[in-house]
């Protein structure tokens, strides 16, 4: 404990020694800099010391400016990804495909289920049929109504931009991935942090790093070629590439995140917890599962959240392994198309400024918003809770 | 008593099982790709261009494209990441709001999906910056910079890998002994002098590690270049920053999903995957080794 205290307090003391200096430059304590510049102006031959001060000032300003870049990038991300999606929200776009509405077959476009009738309702459907020439022009537009419909069919005579099947696909894949990766990652982290002998830890850690370092396209390739075939032999599902294959492959990308964050949280549980528990006569596994794990719950929760974020945002694995058919159901042995895969597969072929283009940016904005919220939540809420819990204990 | 012991053994072995299933998965994937790809992986494969509609030949252009991508990416990204890390550790005080906001921005950046970076590259670099350059230079007559190319893909990738660099350099800077820093200040050195002579020099390994990790991440990430510059097939190598390029990961994706004859080119796909895997391995292992050294030096 003593050791911990010195380690925590010493830097702060050093920091407070330095602080006046930092503050004078950070908060723009102008007299000093003004004095400096006036002095440099007045003296014909600025001494070495003063030159140094000027370079000092410049260096600090430049460094700060560069450091702001990452902040600027976040802002620009917001502006440009959302900016391209704005036409959708305000409805300013002209229909992407002009009135080629003489095409009258409406049935076979809906992947074998009456999705269109279901959303439009019987009365609407009848009207749509009779007014097919006029409505077709409207369906090219992405209104709120068509965005929430159950058909994703951007490239057809009557483009339909229903996001529901894409969201459903993403959810199915994510759920499968997290259900598989969550327990494996957490249990493996418990093993590494509590039970594992030194040699096992030395083997495990590099393997986790290797798994984390696998390019997602390699995992996607493995899933597409090997995993899908093996699983089809095993489960006998009709679709070779489906949400389950995609989710299973995705779990390989999620495991390292869940493992790393959980192990970190377990490692941060104060030693007193373990010692007290063992001193009371609890065995090692009881300590691990009933003392250490509950103490680290917020961290484990954060690990799962970050894992969900990763699964949600991963593109290449799902693009290669899920079959990419936009379906809407709860069946995980069906081909699905996720939000990310839709952007990845279709963005290269759209015309700039078209409705389809804006809808893809809208999907990107949704992804961005979702992962942003998830990360912010994991960061502030969970970390704050964890910190409070441990600080309350150690004092 | 006995019952709890049985449960205990069960609990421990379940966690052990989970841990070693991870090892098993990694081994299975590696073996699968090595077995599938080792026959095709020859010197000719690495140094020839694809022929016969990409059903024969090698992957030389993809290797060159990947190398160019990560080099330009590092030139843009590593200095920015290093400077940001220096600001966060040396200039900003731990509690200042600015530093916290920047830290949060870096964390957020690390969590943004790769495909969203691709969209950003398309909307910002290609349309806004590139289109703007075209408008200024040629009044919009020709489309040179306002289309997917090597430069914009590299820039997008640099942003994607920025957090990797920042985190790794920060760790290295923190490993520089406080005594060195204090000695430098005590001798009358200014902050900038200390940063230049002590901090940067002392954390060179960390900067290198960050660069390597970023390169490894950049080489493996395909989503951002799907529509910011990656090309299906090019008869010649890119000769300027405004050219499109072939890339290893993108090549794998194309060959497995959109090739003329997917079954016949399977050995090529496996061999390309093996090359990419070996490349990221080498990079990651050197990064792990270097980081190990940094950590060891801090403990001393």
Image (cartoon, rainbow, N blue to C red):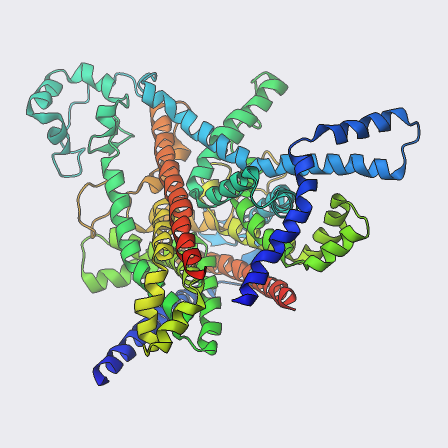
Q: Residue furthest bottom?
A: B2
Q: Choose top left, top right, bottom left or bottom right for residue B242.
A: top right
Q: Is residue B36 visible?
A: yes
Of residues A131 and B215, the one drawn nearer to the viewer in this rendering:
B215
Q: Residue furthest right?
A: A45
Query: Vertically, is A179 above or below A348?
Result: below
Question: Residue at the spot x=60%, y=40% of the render?
Answer: B238
- Figure label count: 0
Of residues A111 and A260, the one drawn nearer to the viewer in this rendering:
A260
In the rendered image, residue A53, in percent from the top left (x then y), is placed at 80, 37
B41 horizontally vs A20: left or right: left
Q: Quadrant of the C terminus of chain A?
A: bottom left
Question: Residue at the spot x=33%, y=38% of the render?
Answer: A342
In the rendered image, residue A183, in percent from the top left (x then y), is placed at 30, 62
A146 horizontally vs A71: left or right: left
Of residues B249 and B142, the one drawn nearer to the viewer in this rendering:
B249
B211 horizontally vs A195: left or right: right
In the rendered image, residue A216, in percent from the top left (x then y), is placed at 42, 53
Question: Residue at the spot x=58%, y=42% of the render?
Answer: B236
Q: Is residue B54 visible?
A: no
Query: Vertically, is B210 above or below A53?
Result: below
Question: Residue at the spot x=53%, y=41% of the render?
Answer: B100
Of residues A211 and B72, the one drawn nearer to the viewer in this rendering:
A211
Q: Choose top left, top right, bottom left or bottom right for residue A298.
A: bottom left
In the rendered image, residue B179, in percent from the top left (x then y), is placed at 72, 59
């Amino acid at each position: 404990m003593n050791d911990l205290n010195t380690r925590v307090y010493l830097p702060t003391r050093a920091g407070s020694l330095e602080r006046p200096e930092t503050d004078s430059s950070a908060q723009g304590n102008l007299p000093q800099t003004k004095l400096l510049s006036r002095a440099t102006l007045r003296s014909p031959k600025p001494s070495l010391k003063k030159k140094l001060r000027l370079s000092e000032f410049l260096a600090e300003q430049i460094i700060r400016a560069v450091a702001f870049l990452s902040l600027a990038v976040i802002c620009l991300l917001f502006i440009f990804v959302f900016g391209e999606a704005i036409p959708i929200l305000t409805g300013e776009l002209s229909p992407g495909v002009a009135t080629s509405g003489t095409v009258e077959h409406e049935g076979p476009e809906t992947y074998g289920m009456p999705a269109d009738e279901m959303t439009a309702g019987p009365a609407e459907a009848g009207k749509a049929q009779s007014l097919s020439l006029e409505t077709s022009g409207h369906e090219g537009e992405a209104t709120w109504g068509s965005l929430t419909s159950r058909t994703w069919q951007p490239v057809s005579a009557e483009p339909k931009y229903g996001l529901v099947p894409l969201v459903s696909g993403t959810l199915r894949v994510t759920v499968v991935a997290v259900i598989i990766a969550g327990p494996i990652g957490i249990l493996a982290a418990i093993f590494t942090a509590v039970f594992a002998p030194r040699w096992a830890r030395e083997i495990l850690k590099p393997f986790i790093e290797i798994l984390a370092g696998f390019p997602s396209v390699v995992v996607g390739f493995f899933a597409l070629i090997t995993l899908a075939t093996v699983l089809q032999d095993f489960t006998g599902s009709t679709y070779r590439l489906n949400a389950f294959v995609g989710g299973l492959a995705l779990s390989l990308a999620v495991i390292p995140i869940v493992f790393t964050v959980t192990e970190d949280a377990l490692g941060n549980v104060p030693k007193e917890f373990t010692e007290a528990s063992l001193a009371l006569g609890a065995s090692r596994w009881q300590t691990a599962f009933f003392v250490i794990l509950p103490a680290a719950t917020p961290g484990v929760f954060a690990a799962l959240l970050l894992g969900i974020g990763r699964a949600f945002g991963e593109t290449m694995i799902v693009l290669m392994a899920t079959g990419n058919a936009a379906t809407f159901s709860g069946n995980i042995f069906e081909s699905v198309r996720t939000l990310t895969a839709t952007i990845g597969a279709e963005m290269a072929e759209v015309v700039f400024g078209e409705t389809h283009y804006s809808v893809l940016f809208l999907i990107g904005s949704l992804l961005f918003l979702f992962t942003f919220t998830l990360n912010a939540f994991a960061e502030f809420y969970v970390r704050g809770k964890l910190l409070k819990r441990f600080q309350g204990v150690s004092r | 008593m006995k019952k709890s012991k049985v449960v205990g053994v069960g609990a421990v072995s379940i966690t052990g099982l989970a841990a070693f299933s991870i090892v098993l998965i990694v081994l299975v994937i590696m073996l699968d790709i090595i077995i599938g790809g080792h026959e095709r992986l020859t010197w000719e494969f690495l140094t020839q261009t694809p022929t016969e509609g990409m059903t024969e030949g090698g992957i030389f252009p993809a290797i060159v494209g990947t190398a160019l991508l990560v080099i330009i990416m590092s030139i843009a990204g590593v200095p920015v990441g290093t400077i940001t890390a220096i600001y966060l550790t040396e200039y900003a005080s731990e509690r200042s709001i600015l530093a916290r906001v920047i830290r949060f921005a870096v964390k957020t950046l690390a969590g943004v999906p790769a495909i969203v970076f691709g969209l950003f590259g398309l909307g910002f670099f290609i349309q806004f910056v590139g289109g703007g350059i075209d408008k200024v230079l040629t009044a919009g007559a020709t489309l040179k910079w306002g289309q997917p190319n090597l430069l914009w893909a590299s820039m997008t990738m640099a942003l994607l890998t920025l957090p990797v660099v920042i985190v790794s350099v920060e760790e290295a800077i923190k490993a520089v002994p406080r005594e060195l820093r204090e000695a430098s200040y005590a001798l009358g050195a200014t902050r900038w002098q200390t940063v230049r002579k002590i901090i940067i020099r002392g954390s060179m390994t960390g900067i290198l590690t960050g660069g390597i990790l970023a390169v490894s991440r950049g080489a493996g990430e395909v989503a951002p270049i799907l529509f910011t510059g990656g090309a299906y097939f090019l008869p010649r190598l890119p000769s300027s920053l405004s050219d499109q390029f072939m890339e290893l990961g993108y090549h794998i994706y194309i060959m497995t999903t959109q090739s003329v004859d997917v079954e016949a080119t399977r050995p090529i796909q496996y061999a390309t995957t093996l090359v990419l895997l070996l490349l990221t391995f080498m990079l990651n292992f050197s990064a792990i080794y270097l980081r190990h050294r940094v950590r060891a030096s801090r403990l001393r």
